[in-house]
Image: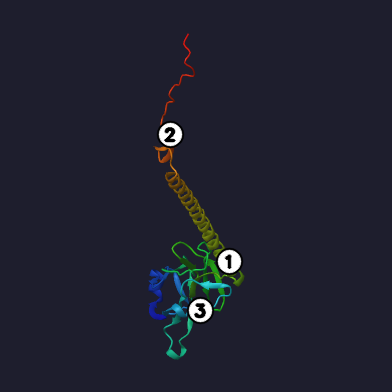
């Protein structure tokens, strides 16, 4: 949490405007009721933002920052708040950083929220570069819709279902691969046993055909025998 104070002259403020911290106040702005000098007090609530401000059904993704104008011509005892009337452009509030919760959707719609000096809460759209637009002083932040408890449960169930499905697919692939390897090993083992058994009982020659060893009978020609000795 931090704060600072800057004093301005109304005439100079009307001509030049102001650019301090995360705020850009355009020219053509006057204090109301009019005073010759006024102070702007800047606040950054940091990590204590949610202790000072609460928005129902929304979550802060930036710290709450704000500025208020006070009459500098009064004594400390009568130091009172004043308003700023903008005649032309708007006040720009820039948030350099935002922090989205891990369990939230990255495509969620962000909103600017303004806590006005009269106690009202105003919502507006976030412009480019995490910038909000305002028509007066107050406190500002960027918020996103909070996840409901049932939404968190559904998201958690869906996450575990996806993880379980992925693990199941990987397990099925490993089971198929292991089954194929086991079948191949059994086939090779049976073939080896058959070859060893054939070598033990081998009565025929064997030859290799490719990677397989098969039995082969040697060529034997039967000798001719004369059935009788009769010669005409």
Check whether the beta carbons of the residues at disc 3 and disc 1 lie within 8 A of each other. Answer: no
For marks 2 and 3, the one nearer the N-term is 3
Q: Quadrant of the N terminus?
A: bottom left
For marks 1 and 2, the one nearer the N-term is 1
Front: mark 3 or 1: 1
The residue closer to the viewer here, 197 or 58, is 197
The picture places residue 193, in percent across and down from the top left corner, at: 46, 49
The residue that disc 2 covers is 217
The colour scheme of the drawn protein is rainbow
The picture places residue 110, in percent across and down from the top left corner, at: 52, 66
Outermost residue, right side: 150
For marks 3 and 1, the one nearer the N-term is 3
The residue that disc 1 covers is 157
73 lies above or below 101: below
The picture places residue 124, in percent across and down from the top left corner, at: 54, 67
Front: mark 1 or 2: 2
Check whether the beta carbons of the residues at disc 2 and disc 3 lie within 8 A of each other. Answer: no
Q: Secondary structure at mark 1?
A: helix
Q: Residues within 10 Å of mark 3 (few under 14, many from 20)?
A: some
Check whether the beta carbons of the residues at disc 1 and disc 2 lie within 8 A of each other. Answer: no
The residue that disc 3 covers is 50
Q: Label 2, label 3: how many angstroms apart (C-alpha)?
A: 96 Å
Q: Secondary structure at mark 3?
A: helix
Q: Quadrant of residue 92?
A: bottom left
Q: Label 1, label 2: how many angstroms apart (C-alpha)?
A: 71 Å
Outermost residue, top side: 232
């Amino acid at each position: 949490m931090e704060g600072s104070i800057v004093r301005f002259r109304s005439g100079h403020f009307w001509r030049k405007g102001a650019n301090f911290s995360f705020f850009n106040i355009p020219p053509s702005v006057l204090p109301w009721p009019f005073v010759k000098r006024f102070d702007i007090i800047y606040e950054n609530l940091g990590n204590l933002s949610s202790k000072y401000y609460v928005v129902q059904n929304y979550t802060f993704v930036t710290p709450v920052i704000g500025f208020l104008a006070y009459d500098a011509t009064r004594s400390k005892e009568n130091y009172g708040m004043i308003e700023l009337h903008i005649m032309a452009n708007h006040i720009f509030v820039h948030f350099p950083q935002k922090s989205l919760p891990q369990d939230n959707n990255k495509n969620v719609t962000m909103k600017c929220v303004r806590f006005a000096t009269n106690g009202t809460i105003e919502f507006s759209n976030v412009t480019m570069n995490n910038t909000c637009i305002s028509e007066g002083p107050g406190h500002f932040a960027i918020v996103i819709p909070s996840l409901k408890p049932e939404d968190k449960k559904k998201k958690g169930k869906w996450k575990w279902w996806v993880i379980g499905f992925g693990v199941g697919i990987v397990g099925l692939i490993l089971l198929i691969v292991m089954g194929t390897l086991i079948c191949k090993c059994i086939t090779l083992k049976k073939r080896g046993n058959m070859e060893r058994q054939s070598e033990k009982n081998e009565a025929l020659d064997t030859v290799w055909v490719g990677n397989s060893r098969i039995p082969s009978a040697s060529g034997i020609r039967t000798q001719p025998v004369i059935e009788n000795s009769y010669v005409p």
